[in-house]
Amino acid sequence: QVQLVESGGGLVQAGGSLRLSCAASGRLFNINAMAWYRQAPGKQRELVATITSGGGTNYAESVKGRFTISRDNALVYLQMNSLKPEDTAVYYCNAMDVTGSYWGQGTQVTVSS
């Protein structure tokens, strides 16, 4: 089992920055990749960024050049710059291993115009 706890969400004006953190605990040695997803009201959950165990990263087109995912042992970060109102959503941390996929409880990010 893997437990994930997100933090760092909040209210920010358009153009501002936030850094989300995800603290992972439990059976971490089998984790293949970690990711950030987000879900806006009335929309499906979407993938924002991924980072593999080897450090490879991938981003949704909508956040390329603005968001950066990074990992430091059991912590995963999402640095979000130049935020837009359309980035408003609940952001979820995700971890994947050979047995399944694990989710945090989510953290709200609200970007005002």
Image: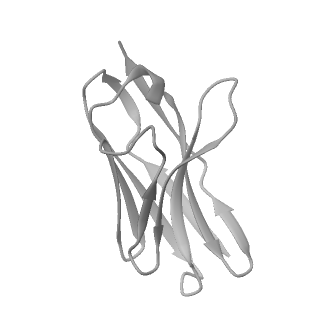
- Please provide percent x and percent y for residue 5: 52, 57
Q: Outermost residue toward the bottom?
A: 29
Q: Is residue 4 above or below residue 6?
A: below
Q: Is residue 2 left or right of residue 15?
A: right
Count of numbered circles on the image = 0
Question: At 60% across and 29% down in the image, what residue appears?
Answer: 40
Q: How is the image coloured?
A: one colour
- Please provide percent x and percent y for residue 23: 45, 63
- Please provide percent x and percent y for residue 8: 37, 44
The answer to which quarter of the image holds residue 64 is: top left
Q: Outermost residue toward the front?
A: 61
Taking depth in this image into account, of 100 and 10 the one nearest to the observer is: 100
Q: Quadrant of the N terminus?
A: bottom right
Q: Is residue 11 above or below residue 74?
A: above
Taking depth in this image into account, of 63 and 19 the one nearest to the observer is: 63
Question: At 66% across and 41% down in the image, what residue appears?
Answer: 45
Q: Outermost residue toward the top?
A: 113
The answer to which quarter of the image holds residue 46 is: top right
Question: At 35% across and 12% down in the image, what residue appears?
Answer: 113
